[in-house]
Image (cartoon, rainbow, N blue to C red):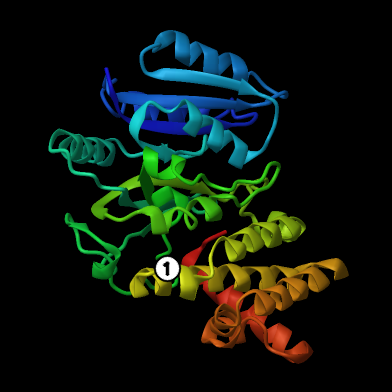
Amino acid sequence: MEKTITFGIPCYNSAAYMDHCISSIIDGSGQAEDVQVVIVDDGSTKDDTPAKADEWAERYPDNIKVVHQENGGHGIAVLSALEQADGAYFKVVDSDDWLDEKALRSLLETLRGFIAHDRQVDLVITNYVYEHVEDNKQSTIDYAFALPKGKVIGWDKIGHFYIWQNLLMHSLCYRTAVLRDGGVPMPAHTFYVDNIYAYVPLPRCKTLYYLDVDLYRYFIGREDQSVNEQVMIGRIDQQLRITRIMMEAYHLYDDIESPKLRSYMIGYFTLMMAVCSIFSKKSDDPQAHADCQKLWDDLEAYDKRMYRRARRGFVGMATNLPTSYGTKATLWIYRVAQKMFKFN
């Protein structure tokens, strides 16, 4: 049977939590025949992730594929899942996260309707929920006012996205062909590639649809998690690498026809540059400061309009205040935002 959607699940030493993730899709969908899961064992060595993946495939051979590969990092695992996908749509679910059953069934009903009526919708957007481990609280990111609900639209119909409403990997369900046509430049052995995944394919999406359901449950707060603050500081080199790839993907003012999409993308890119500035300031490694400054210099040489928007706007100014007092003010602004939105 042709698959409606493929869920790619990158797994690296994920035995402690991958069952919950996979079950939320297989059981949450009612073991639907048109739902596929591709589990990518990305060179796991410390636990029985490979065996668990094979057990799932043995139980549901018509629904689950398994890829065993040498460790390549999250981005390479996503690309491996995409290569094996048989679904008309594709969504990434990290192995420590899960999907809400009611919202999943709503998504499947929507996608099946598009396919049955031969409606080519390139991107379906849903809400996601931060599941905070430290206080067992939840916070939902939705797209109210930024997107009309339940309508197939083009980028010219989107509204204003607030700084906390970026379209992250957790909210995106792409038509598979959109991802394959043109590719997604995911580097190996690099964290934070989800930003590339949520940015580079957008101009290839000509139609989008906002389904207002709280689908993705994003577990946050584990000490070794990639978005943990101390981990991010230690991996500032990877953050810089990802942001450079995003920078070089487009000359936004020349390449993006839709003014509203361009505005959204420059806002997202500006936030990425701000993150680089903040964590390079928090790092004790002087090379991090130099590398961040080089990225800013390279951006100015690459595209002066992108540079002016990213550096001279409010976010750019607030995260690059001069002098040691300015650095303290920048870090205070970051800390306030962190407490408000609990993003790491």
Q: Is residue 73 visible?
A: yes
Q: Position of residue 16 (x, y in %)?
A: 58, 28
Name the residue furthest front.
254
- Answer left or right for 326 relative to 201: right
**Point 56% across, 27% down: residue:** 40
Q: Position of residue 103 (x, y in %)?
A: 26, 42
Residue 140, placed above or below residue 13: below
Mark 1: amino acid? Ile
Nearer to the camera, 33 or 48: 33
Which residue is painted at 26% across and 64% down in the image?
147
- Packing grade of label 1 (10 A; few <14, some 14-19, many >=20) is some
Q: Is residue 19 visible?
A: no
Label 1: element kind: loop
Quarter holding the N terminus? top left
Where does the image place residue 119, in percent across and percent down from the top left? 18, 43
Within the image, what quadrant is residue 71 found in? top right
The residue drawn where x is 61% and y is 52% is 192
Q: Residue furthest left?
A: 117
Asked whether, in this view, residue 341 is left or right of residue 321, the answer is left
Q: Is residue 289 left or right of residue 274?
A: right
Locate residue 294, reporting x and y percent.
77, 73
Q: Is residue 236 above or below residue 156?
A: above
Q: In this view of the protein, which residue sits in the foreground, 237 or 253?
A: 253
* Rendered residue at 41%/10% (across/down): 59
Residue sitting nearer the eye, 82 or 136:
82
For residue 310, above or below residue 193: below
Which residue lies under the disc numbered 1? 256
Point out the residue furthest to the top here. 58
- Quarter of the image with the C terminus in it: bottom right
